[in-house]
Image (cartoon, rainbow, N blue to C red):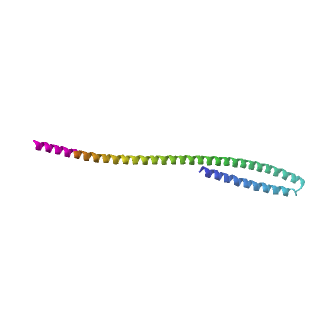
């Protein structure tokens, strides 16, 4: 939005500069026409035209200064946009690294869960074997007595 405002302002200044250039051209034409007038009126016309030309030149200089300021603002905004783009890229890279770390962590947790389930199954098998041995020993003791 600030770029659009700067662009609109730059366009307005360009249009003003063009209008002033046309005005300058028209004034130069008036000056040429004034050369055919009588000496007294010619002198008055020349002085008036010089004043208008000086004013127009001053306006053109002001428009050029404004254009230079706008160009500097545009340059600054482009630099800010580039910096923001670099920051966004760095953030995205960090996010990707964090996601990869999370995926690795989830894989590790899944492996731990699988190992835990296997351990529980082996423990249940061992307990069943111990129970069977105890039953066998108990049966042997019962039989012996």
Residue at (78, 54) in percent of width and height: 24
Is 144 part of what is drawn in magenta? Answer: yes
Q: Nearer the viewer, residue 71 or 47?
A: 71
Question: Splitting the image into 4 quarters, where does residue 145 fall?
Answer: top left
Tell me the residue at 62%/51% (across/down).
Answer: 5
The residue lying toward the viewer, choosing from 70 and 23, is: 70
- Residue under the point 30% across and 46% down: 119
- The residue segment tinted magenta is 130-145
Tell me which residue sits at (70%, 48%) in the image.
Answer: 68
In percent of width and height, residue 75 lies at 65, 48
Q: Give percent across and percent down for residue 57.
A: 77, 49
Residue 134 part of the magenta-drawn span: yes
Q: Left or right? Give the position of 6 relative to 53.
A: left
Give the image location of residue 18, x and y in percent.
73, 55
- Main secondary structure type of the part rendered in magenta: helix
Question: In terms of depth relative to the viewer, which is nearer, 116 or 20?
Answer: 116
């Amino acid at each position: 939005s600030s770029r659009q405002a700067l662009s609109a302002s730059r366009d307005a200044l360009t249009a003003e500069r063009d209008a002033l250039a046309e005005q300058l051209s028209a004034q130069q034409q008036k000056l040429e026409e004034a050369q055919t007038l009588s000496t007294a009126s010619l002198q008055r016309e020349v002085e008036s035209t010089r004043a208008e030309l000086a004013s127009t030149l001053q306006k053109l200089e002001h428009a050029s200064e404004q254009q230079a300021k706008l160009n500097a603002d545009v340059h600054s905004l482009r630099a800010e946009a580039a910096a923001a783009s670099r920051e966004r890229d760095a953030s995205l890279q960090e996010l990707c690294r964090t996601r990869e770390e999370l995926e690795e962590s989830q894989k590790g947790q899944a492996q731990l869960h699988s190992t835990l389930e296997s351990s529980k199954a082996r423990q249940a098998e061992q307990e069943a074997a111990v129970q069977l041995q105890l039953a066998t020993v108990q049966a042997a003791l019962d039989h012996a007595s």
